[in-house]
Image (cartoon, rainbow, N blue to C red):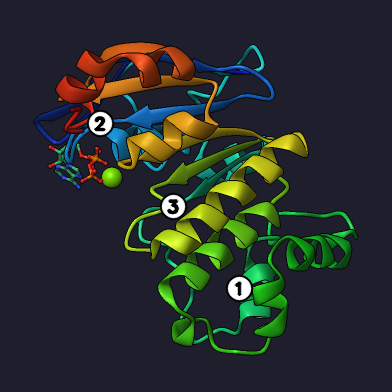
């Protein structure tokens, strides 16, 4: 459904993405891995059109997204759950969820909120609590819940496990799989390569603005050299 071909993105004179070609097929979870500064967040920001690519093609279900603005990208069903969560700290949990539905014109918002509360019972218990007082893991759940309120076809997740206790990471990864089973395709940016390869169908490894490597996640997981060279794992 998503196809990027030879995408180049700059920050002023800094050439951050140097020809990214990747695709996400309908129903897939695709991981985008790589070290700090490789260009993972820049790739997601280019897809959600917070950044304008200088060159390349970008299609969603065969339609070019290059001329769309960030709001139109959302209306096309691509929802970006940003790095570092970015919840509104002074709004309650429920108010944050409502913000996620702001572009919608249908009347099923209430129903979808119930569904988010079903997926994240912790959020339901805390619906009137100020988001800034939630734990890091709960804020991550809220950020994902808020993204779901936008009714994504394709969900862009930027480092959902960052700074979160292992037990909650496990829970969040299970929920990501559950969201995917409900029909949402997912592009998952992660430094936790091990977990990401565990739940994704396909993976790309970014290195310094290039795709250094790509393949089926199950094959990458098996390849010790790949894990050592590209994923910073010490393989015994
Ligand atoms: N606003 C900016 N202005 C200039 N350069 C930037 C800006 N944002 C990012 N960069 C540069 O672009 C490159 C890619 O950054 P990006 O944030 O995409 O990396 P990342 O893979 O998401 O890293 P991390 O794992 O640390 O989040 C880096 O060299 C970074 O310094
Ligand atoms: Mg990043």
Q: Position of residue 47 (x, y in %)?
A: 45, 32
- Front disc: 3 or 1: 3
Seen in the picture, residue 114 relative to 134 is either above or below; the reply is: above
Q: Earlier in the sequence, mark 1 or mark 2?
A: 2
Query: Mark 2 falls on what kind of element?
Result: loop
Asked whether, in this view, residue 27 is left or right of residue 182, the answer is left
How many numbered markers are drawn?
3
Asked whether, in this view, residue 142 is left or right of residue 98, the answer is left
Q: Position of residue 168 (x, y in %)?
A: 49, 63
Q: What residue is pinned by disc 1? A: 96
Most extreme residue toward the left, as rendered? Answer: 13
Query: Mark 3 falls on what kind of element?
Result: loop
Q: Position of residue 235 (x, y in %)?
A: 20, 28
C-alpha distance separating marks 2 and 3: 15 Å
Query: Mark 1 falls on what kind of element?
Result: helix
- Ligand 1 shows up in the quarter that is top left
Q: What residue is pinned by disc 3? A: 160
Q: What residue is pinned by disc 2? A: 34
Asked whether, in this view, residue 182 is left or right of residue 37, the answer is right
Q: Earlier in the sequence, mark 3 or mark 1?
A: 1
Seen in the picture, residue 136 relative to 166 is either above or below; the reply is: below
Confirm or deny contact between disc 3 and disc 1 (CB under 8 A): no
**Which quarter of the figure has residue 84?**
bottom left
Query: Dot 3 surroundings within 10 Å: few (below 14), some, or many (20 or more)?
Result: many
Q: Quadrant of the C terminus?
A: top left
Q: Position of residue 53 (x, y in %)?
A: 33, 25
Asked whether, in this view, residue 181 is left or right of residue 230, the answer is right
């Amino acid at each position: 459904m998503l196809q990027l071909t030879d995408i180049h993105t700059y920050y002023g004179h800094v050439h951050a993405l140097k020809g990214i070609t990747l695709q996400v097929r309908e129903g897939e979870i695709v991981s985008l891995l790589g070290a700090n500064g490789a260009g993972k967040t820049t790739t997601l920001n280019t897809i959600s059109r917070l950044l304008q690519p200088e060159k390349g093609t970008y299609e969603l279900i065969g339609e070019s997204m290059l001329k769309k603005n960030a709001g139109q990208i959302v209306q096309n069903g691509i929802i970006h759950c940003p790095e570092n969560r970015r919840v509104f700290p002074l709004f309650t949990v429920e108010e944050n969820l409502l913000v996620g539905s702001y572009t919608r014109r249908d009347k099923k918002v209430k129903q979808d909120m119930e569904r988010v509360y079903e997926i994240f019972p912790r959020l339901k218990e805390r619906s009137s609590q100020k988001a800034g007082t939630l734990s890091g893991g709960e804020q991550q759940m809220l950020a994902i819940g808020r993204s779901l309120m936008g009714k994504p076809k394709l969900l862009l997740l930027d480092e959902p496990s960052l700074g979160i206790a292992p037990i909650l990471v496990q829970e969040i990864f299970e929920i990501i799989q559950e969201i995917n089973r409900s029909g949402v395709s997912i592009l998952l940016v992660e430094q936790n390569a091990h977990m990401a390869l565990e739940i994704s169908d396909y993976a790309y490894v970014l290195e310094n603005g290039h795709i250094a490597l790509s393949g089926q996640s199950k094959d990458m997981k098996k390849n010790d050299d790949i894990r050592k060279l590209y994923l910073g794992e010490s393989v015994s």
